[in-house]
Image (spheres, helix red, strand yellow):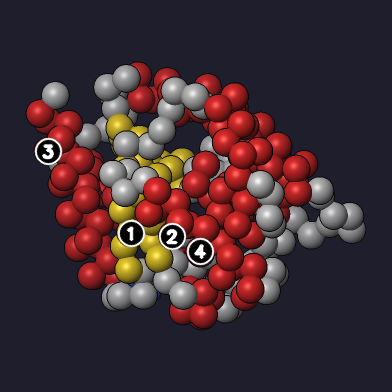
Amino acid sequence: MKGSFITLEGIEGVGKTTNTSFIKNFLENSGKKVLVTREPGGTSFGENLREIILEEKDYKLSIITECLIMFAARSQHIEEVIKPALSDDYYVVCDRFTDATYAYQGGGRGLPKDVIDHLKYIVHPDLEPDLTIYLDAPEKISFSRIEDRNKDSFEKEDLAFFKNVRSSYLEQASLHQDRIMIVDASNSLDEVQKDISHYLKVLLDRNSDV
Ligand SMILES: Nc1ncnc2c1ncn2[C@@H]1O[C@H](COP(=O)(O)OP(=O)(O)OP(=O)(O)O)[C@@H](O)[C@H]1O
Ligand SMILES: [Mg+2]
């Protein structure tokens, strides 16, 4: 595949969506074709599943059901959108991917890591992001940025849940230091975008060498 796969990760309100647009502009200004997408979602099937996962329910999804839905949406997203775009030379910029499953269903909900490893192996044994920007900030800071928003089913979890999600993200970043770049998202947006630009330049340089 000739394109590149870039993912953004982090807890609620750290700036993933804001910086997805920034990355799109940066790459387009560098002459690249860019496709922006998100998870859960990214296809009409996946967006339907997203609604089911995030809406208020009068029943509770089991942890494994929630995880399977994430991977079902992801499988469709990969086959229908991500792989075709990468084959067509696109830079695919995705707001959350499998690192989020490790962080939320693993760290947050307590699903064993090897269950997620297995599902990842089934769904995308041959696809890994080329670059992951992990936006890191204490949950109190990121949550203060989205105070006025209507909360979805995850955003209603308590701060302890997000502390675990954040720890899990940091653990993954330390396991995959060549891929996951930690950006301090408690800094000003200008500083955050300076850091992201640096990592994008490194990726573009690497791609121009091959
Ligand atoms: N570094 C920053 N400093 C201050 N405010 C920021 C920063 N980054 C983003 N914001 C603001 O914080 C709010 C949340 O940002 P954004 O929607 O991009 O977060 P998100 O990670 O996509 O959240 P969610 O997980 O809920 O989708 C927005 O109002 C955005 O303008
Ligand atoms: Mg967002």
Query: Residue 33 in the image: x percent, y percent?
Result: 27, 32
Q: Secondary structure at mark 2?
A: helix
Name the residue that disc number 1 marks. 182
Q: Which residue type carries mark 4?
A: Ser
- Disc 3 vs disc 4: which is toward the camera? 4
First of labels 3, 1 by sequence position: 1
In the image, which disc is placed on residue 205?
3
Residue labelled with disc 4: 167
Q: Position of residue 37 (x, y in %)?
A: 46, 41
Contact between marks 4 and 2 (CB within 8 A): the answer is yes
Q: Is residue 201 left or right of residue 52?
A: left
Q: Residue at x 61, y 31 (%)?
A: 118
Give residue 183's quadrant in the image: bottom left
Residue 161 lies, with reference to residue 131, above or below; the image says below
Q: Residues within 10 Å of mark 2 (few under 14, many from 20)?
A: some
Q: Are marks 3 and 4 in contact (CB under 8 Å)?
A: no
Identify the residue at horizontal 52%, vertical 58% (top origin). Answer: 168
Q: Quadrant of residue 91?
A: top left
- Indicate whether 164 appears above or below 76: below
What's the residue at 30%, 32% (across, down)?
A: 4
Query: What kind of residue is marked 3?
Result: Asp
Question: Pointers 2 and 1 in contact (CB under 8 A)?
Answer: yes
Residue under numbered circle 2 = 170
Q: Quadrant of the C terminus?
A: top left
Q: Ligand 1: give its quadrant.
A: bottom left
Question: Image check: 59 left or right of 178?
Answer: right
Residue at image location 45% in from the left, 56% down from the top: 171
Report, in whole angstroms, how far the alpha carbon at label 4 lies from the one at label 2. Answer: 5 Å
Res 72 → quadrant: top right
Mark 2 and mark 1: span between their CA atoms?
A: 8 Å
